[in-house]
Structure formats: structure tokens, C-alpha cells
Amino acid sequence: MPSLADLIHPVSPDRFRNEIEGRVPLHIPAEGAAAEARRGLLDWDTFNGLLNQSSIWTHSTLKLVHSGQPLDPETYCSEVQSMSGPVFRPSPARVQVMAAMGATIVANDVGALTPALRDICATLRHAWAASVAANIYCSFKGVQGFGPHYDTHDVFAVQTEGEKVWRLYRNREPDPVDYPGEGEEVRRYLASACGPLMQEVRMRPGDVLYVPRGWYHDALAVDGPSLHVTLSITPLYGRILFRLLESAAMQDPAFRAWLPPASREGGKPLSDQLTDLGQRLARLAASPAFAQEIAMTQERLMGRGADYRLPERPALTTYAPTGLLPPAVRGPAAVAMEWALSQPRFALEDMIAQFDFVPETDMRAAIEAGVRAGALKPVQ
């Protein structure tokens, strides 16, 4: 599944961006080859194969939910002996007993566990400059896993096996970034806050449902076992400015100066200083350099990623600074070059691996320019 267009076919990416994204839910019924690719994202054999790798699961990554309530890990986990000592892990036998009683199995953070999941997560990360998580939900006829709730991220739900009915409610939380918590009181609040039912969507294999963040919904398997994958998309939002601005602002001596007492001269010196600092912050936030900082932070969310190719080992290209100044480097590659020049010697491949939020071509170009200027020299 190499593209966003495949995930949402026959809806075009332009229509999705202009009419749907962040505005309303969208049900995309299975149709054609794209639907077959979506259905191939996960099947029962692949899911069982993942679960059978029992040593990768913990009570945090494999959860059970019944009738809206998470089950205590002690009901489905057991202590087992490992090479590093006793550990508490989900028991395949006990998990299946709970499933027989109707519990929904939730496998969290599975985006790196199969090639298909890795590919679609990488596609969405780059489409939204966001962090993307994939979870698997296995549920059974007539037993509800979760009651009405909303998410703090956008969701694409891909139905891969069986059928499930999703209920979309009228109400929506405005751009939520935090969840109210857990417990019976929270569940009662959500059930009352969701509002009247707006739409029911019956999801079949190959169907996709897009749910914007904050939209109240729940789901129920109706005719047998159901398997679906949720892809959760979380881009940066305004809160990141506070963290990045603090670091950038502290380079300006004005932000390191003491604030005068509010009682002095009726508060005028304090008011004047705060006005000046606010204007400096506004100029800083609007500067190209700060926009570049945001862009680098987005790149960190996406990462470059790499697959293991053992026993092959990469050839290392090693350099050492000479003490001469290199040509000026602009953009994110400047951060990587600053690190390189602080090392007695370094491998270009290590630099590329460490700074996976910087385009590799930019780093290679900066190194080549440094060598031509005599600021770097190759070493054996």
C-alpha cells in the first residue's frame, strides 16, 4: 500500500484534503484492487503469527477490554521465566479464554511488526509530517469493547476480517489534546457527552473509515469475529511552540534579564518589559530560522528508518576536522555539521544514522564541501 491515494481510493487526495480532513467522518467502501490491498494489511494467520511471538508482548502492548472496561492484567497475564529472570507476560491460553468470554484483544504499537504495516505507517507519516501508530483490534459478536469515546488524533480504521458496525455520534470535542482519563465516572461522562446517534457504518473487509480527532464514536462486531487496524495520525500542534521558543529565546539576553517588581512605579516597568519580550517572541516565531526549527522537529517525528540487512555491514567513511573553517551550511544540515566538527573523528554513516531528521543528500553535500575547503580530511 504505497500511497495515500490507495488507502482512500476512490476518493482523491485533493478532495479528501479540501472537503473531509478534520471536518467530517468518511466511510470508504471496498472497491477494486485498492480494496484488496487494504484487506491484505492483516489477516488471521498474520495476526496469530504476531501473537505467537509471545516474548514481544507485555500487559501494556497487549490489552483486553470487555464491555467498555479494561481487564486487570492479572486476569490474562502470567509470570514466566526468561534469561533475565521472571517477567509478567500475557498468557496465550488465558488470553484465548478471555476472548471466548467476549473480550476484545487490543495489540498496540504494531506499526513495525510486518512489512505491510511498516509501509502504510511510513506513507502516512510523510503525508502528514506526523507520528503514526498502528493498533490491532480483535473482537467478537455482540460484545462491545469500548463505549462511546473520542480520540486525540485522527484515525483511519481499516477493516481486514469479518464485519463491524461503527456508530458515529453527533457531538465532537473541539481539537482535544488530552483525554479525561479512565474509570466509571469518565465512561458515564463520555456516554452523556456524545450526543444523539448520527450515523451507523457497517464495515466490511477492505473498507476504510476516517474519523477526525474529537469525534465521538464506538463500534461492535455483529456477525462473528472481527479484525481491524487503526492508524492514528498525530501531527505537531501549537503546544510545541512553547518548548522550542524557550530554547530559542534564551539565546537573547533580554530573556535572561530580571523582571522588575510589579509594585514599582505602578507596574509600568514590568508592563513595558513584558511588552518588549512579547514583541521579541512574535518576531522570533515569525522568523525563517524558527520555521526551519519546526520543520526539523517534524522530520524527527517521521524519521528516515532503516531495515536490518545482516550479515552485510556498511563500509564506513571516516573523516577528521582539520581546524579550518568549513563553508557556511544552511538548513538542518548545519546541526549535523556542528556535531561533526566537534568530534576528533567521525564516520559519515554514523552521522547519517544519528541525524535521521536531516536529508541525507544535504549532509553528504556539506561533508564534500568541507573536504574541498580543507576543513575535513578523510582518514583510514
Image (cartoon, rainbow, N blue to C red):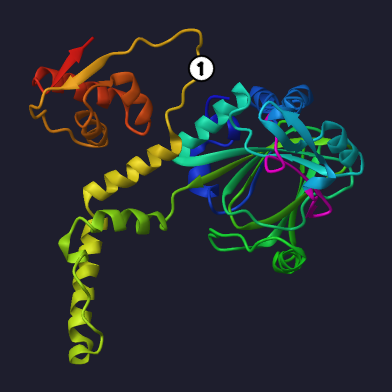
Residue at 51% x, 46% y: name it. 234
- Please tell me which residue lies in front, 66 or 26: 66
Q: Amino acid at mark 1?
A: Tyr
Residue at 75% x, 23% y: name it. 49
User: Which residue has dot 1 on it?
Assistant: 308
- Please tell me which residue lies in front, 100 or 201: 100
Q: Quadrant of the C terminus?
A: top left
The answer, for residue 368, to whether it is visible in the render is yes
Residue at the far bottom in the pictured view: 266
Dividing the picture into quarters, in which one does residue 349 lie?
top left
29 to the left or right of 289: right
Dividing the picture into quarters, in which one does residue 191 lie?
bottom right
Judge whether 21 appears above or below 114 on screen: below
191 to the left or right of 18: right
Residue at 33% x, 40% y: name it. 296
Tell me the magenta residue range: 56-72
Q: Quadrant of the N terminus?
A: top right
314 to the left or right of 233: left
Question: In x, y percent, where is residue 181?
Answer: 66, 61
Judge whether 233 appears above or below 178 on screen: above
Residue at 25% x, 36% y: name it. 335
Q: Was residue 119 drawn as part of the magenta stretch in this picture?
A: no
Question: In x, y percent, where is residue 333?
Answer: 25, 32
